Image (tube, helix red, strand yellow):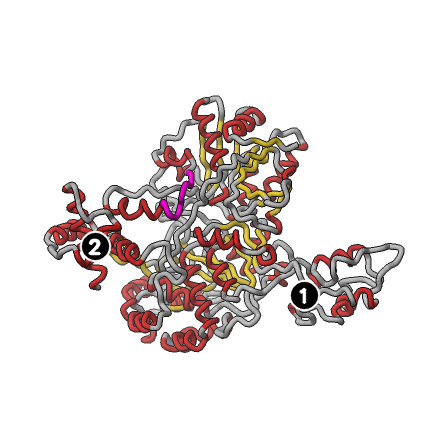
């Protein structure tokens, strides 16, 4: 029986009382965390040390805390616009300070990228695991409570939607209910937040599935991610990646702005294919990487479109949907999907449709009750036909023909386990009509990240492309995506290992890693291509395709020497010779090998002329999908990034230059007004004004 609450403190007390003060609660990653419930539990455990509270989760999202000065002046209004009244988990501020009380423990399997380096408590309580193993890991920790935010149906009082997090909930609940049958005390908790989009399909859940539901009628803003700015490196990585996506195929895009870069390139390929092909010609793509594109890719428009099976539904997929690229439906029926794949039928229901189904033994003659249910589920016949056992219906009878549907229904263009995105993204989901929204099926992570069906999986995910990002990679194809060489955890493995394995199980599938060839920290350029690294996310036996801003390295089934050659070809030229020298030293490549001339000018400067032409044509835009920032704020952001990426010596030099910079305010009035520095009232504000003017000058004159 379900108990209803309108107060977080009351439901927290009920949970503690029911499980005898030992609360091991699983809450989802990202925006589905029931902040009201876990904050109430945290307060109880804080005031009563006899309560043991363990929270298992991932990706704790909190409002950024900008540093005093220019950063705070810039970020606070933007955070207010994007995050509204989003509420942080109370445990987070204490955890960051490493001051959690002994009776409270936070265990995470995926961290907000880079936020917990050198935080001993978080590093010690991190679980390194694949996304598909999280349910088993959660069970191992003897979870007795699962809770998450849900949306409530406006039409059905008994109906809720798991919305943003169907990923693990259903499988964990199945296990908890089995344990409950054997006497274990468990709680299955829903916290209603009607700001969540009401997603359909597997996300729909009845009230009786929960033991407790809390609805305060006061709904906090969802955590939103600002739209990404694409760098030159991002743009070209997206462009190269887009050449490997096949029409009529399946797509998975990983977390981060490189997914936006790929989306941007796919839209260009579809919308202006002649220009797209011209850019590739300018980059000598056919001469340099023609073999892998011929084997694994295509350059044409998307006539049949793509289907997506992904752990995360993001803004990128909605952009592809609106541009009519994400439009291929798949169906959860082996026989039907097989007929569609072999083009014996289309999604248009024709008079011979039933005969084809009968011939392929998908339905029977006379029809059974199951046959009628199948035909109606997929829209082949209308719902007004009722099965009558005393008068069996033949497929060829005129009665059936008169009640044929027009097109197949119940098809899905996307399956996903969770979502997170921008404020626009959430609004778009809320605004989609039900007929369109039902095509986006939120489901189990075990369905998106594994070969969930030996028969149907390969039929739905033909020519699958799994596109993920990494931090670094080695010259022999090992991938570094989650941790540093001292074993400090940056983020997590997530689904990357799952997709690498899945790409080897699915026929004609490919696993693509996107990575910048270099990074800049404190003014120093470092190569992301390494000879070796102790902390590997994916071992080199799972290597497949690696893409940098300089091109494509096809590593599947290649010898070590050939892989080294391919990766050197997409490495920044400043680091090629040293890496080649190391490979020769260790006997992994011939001592007389030289990098071909065509790949010896891998520099960002060499890409600038093409980039400027694309900018002039309106093709390359830092924010291809818009931005929450105004034009003035984008300039200020770039100015402040210069400070962030500077060494201490450069910071001092910049400050001295700023103090000696004496241009009047006219040119900078908008920027100064935005930062509330037009009329400084303190020495600190005066210095910040001088510094801001000088930094803006650098940006707008370069």
Q: Residue 653: in sight, yes or no?
A: yes
Question: Which class describes the residues within 10 Å of circle 1: few (<14), some (14-19), or many (20+)?
Answer: some
Magenta span includes 158: no
Q: Nearer the viewer, residue 570 or 116?
A: 116
The residue indicated by pointer 1 is: 407
Among numbered discs 2 and 1, the one appearing first in the sequence: 1
Task: Specify whether 264 is left or right of 433.
Answer: left
Quadrant of res 308: bottom right
Which marked residue is nearer to the observer: mark 2 or mark 1?
2
Q: Nearer the viewer, residue 347 or 180?
A: 347
Residue interval drawn in magenta: 80-87
Task: Specify whether 163 is left or right of 674.
Answer: right
Q: Residue 594: in sight, yes or no?
A: no
Quadrant of res 590: bottom left
Q: Position of residue 381 (x, y in %)?
A: 74, 62
The residue indicated by pointer 2 is: 669
Q: Nearer the viewer, residue 358 or 71?
A: 71
Q: Residue at x 28, y 48 (%)?
A: 74
Quarter of the picture holding the N terminus: top right
């Amino acid at each position: 029986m379900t108990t209803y609450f309108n107060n977080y403190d009351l439901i927290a007390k009920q949970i503690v009382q029911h499980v005898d003060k030992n609360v091991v609660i699983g809450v989802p990653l990202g925006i589905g965390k029931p902040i009201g419930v876990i904050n109430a539990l945290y307060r109880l455990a804080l005031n009563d040390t006899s309560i043991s509270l363990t929270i298992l989760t991932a990706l704790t999202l909190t409002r950024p805390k900008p540093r005093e000065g220019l950063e705070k002046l810039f970020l606070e209004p933007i955070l207010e616009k994007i995050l509204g009244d989003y509420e942080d988990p109370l445990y987070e501020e204490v955890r960051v300070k490493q001051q959690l009380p002994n009776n409270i423990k936070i265990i995470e399997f995926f961290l907000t990228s880079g936020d917990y380096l050198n935080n001993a408590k978080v590093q010690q309580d991190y679980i390194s695991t694949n996304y598909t193993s999280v349910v088993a890991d959660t069970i191992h920790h003897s979870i007795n409570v699962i809770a998450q935010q849900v949306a409530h149906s406006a039409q059905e009082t008994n109906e809720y939607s798991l919305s943003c997090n169907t990923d693990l909930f259903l499988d964990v609940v199945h296990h908890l209910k089995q344990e409950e049958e054997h006497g274990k005390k468990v709680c299955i908790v829903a916290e209603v937040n009607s700001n969540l989009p009401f997603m359909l399909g597997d996300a729909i859940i009845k009230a009786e599935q929960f033991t407790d539901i809390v609805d305060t009628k006061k709904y906090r803003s969802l955590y939103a991610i600002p739209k990404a700015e694409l760098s030159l490196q991002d743009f070209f990585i997206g462009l190269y990646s887009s050449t490997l996506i096949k029409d009529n195929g399946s797509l998975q895009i990983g977390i981060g702005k490189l997914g936006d870069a790929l989306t941007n390139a796919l839209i260009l390929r579809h919308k202006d294919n002649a220009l797209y092909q011209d850019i590739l010609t300018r980059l000598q793509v056919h001469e340099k990487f023609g073999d892998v594109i011929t084997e694994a890719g295509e350059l044409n428009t998307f006539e049949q479109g793509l289907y997506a099976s992904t752990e995360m539904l993001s803004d990128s997929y909605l952009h592809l949907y609106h541009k009519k690229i994400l439009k291929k439906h798949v169906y959860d029926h082996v026989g039907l999907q097989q007929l569609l794949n072999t083009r014996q039928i289309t999604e248009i229901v024709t008079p011979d449709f039933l005969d084809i189904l009968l011939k392929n033994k998908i339905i029977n003659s006379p029809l059974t009750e199951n046959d009628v249910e199948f035909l109606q589920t997929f829209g082949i016949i209308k719902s007004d036909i009722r099965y009558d056992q005393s008068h069996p219906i033949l497929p060829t009878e005129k009665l059936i023909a008169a009640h044929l549907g027009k097109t197949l229904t119940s098809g899905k263009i996307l399956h996903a386990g969770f979502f997170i995105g921008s404020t626009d993204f959430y609004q778009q989901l809320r605004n989609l009509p039900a007929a369109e929204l039902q095509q986006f099926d939120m489901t189990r992570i075990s369905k998106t990240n594994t070969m969930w069906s030996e028969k149907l999986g390969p039929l739905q995910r033909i020519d699958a492309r799994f596109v993920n990002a990494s931090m670094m990679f080695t010259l022999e194809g090992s991938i570094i995506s989650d941790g540093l060489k001292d074993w400090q955890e940056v983020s997590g493995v997530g689904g990357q290992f799952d997709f690498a394995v899945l790409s080897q199980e699915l026929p004609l599938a490919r696993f693509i890693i996107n990575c910048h060839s270099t990074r800049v920290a404190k003014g120093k350029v470092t190569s992301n291509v390494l000879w070796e690294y102790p902390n590997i996310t994916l071992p080199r036996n799972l290597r497949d395709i690696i893409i940098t801003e300089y091109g494509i390295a096809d590593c599947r089934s290649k010898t070590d020497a050939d892989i080294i050659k391919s990766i050197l070809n997409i490495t920044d030229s400043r680091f090629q010779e040293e890496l080649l020298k190391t490979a020769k030293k260790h006997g992994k490549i011939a001592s007389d090998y030289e990098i071909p001339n065509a790949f010896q000018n891998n520099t960002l400067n060499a890409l600038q002329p093409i980039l400027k032409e694309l900018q002039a044509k309106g093709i390359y835009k830092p924010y291809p999908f818009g931005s929450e920032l105004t034009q003035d704020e984008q300039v200020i952001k770039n100015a402040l990034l210069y400070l962030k990426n500077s060494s201490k010596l450069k910071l001092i030099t910049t400050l001295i230059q700023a103090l000696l910079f004496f241009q009047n305010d006219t040119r900078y009035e908008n920027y100064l007004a935005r930062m509330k520095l037009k009329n400084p009232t303190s020495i600190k504000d005066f210095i910040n004004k001088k510094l801001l003017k000088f930094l803006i000058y650098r940006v707008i004159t370069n």
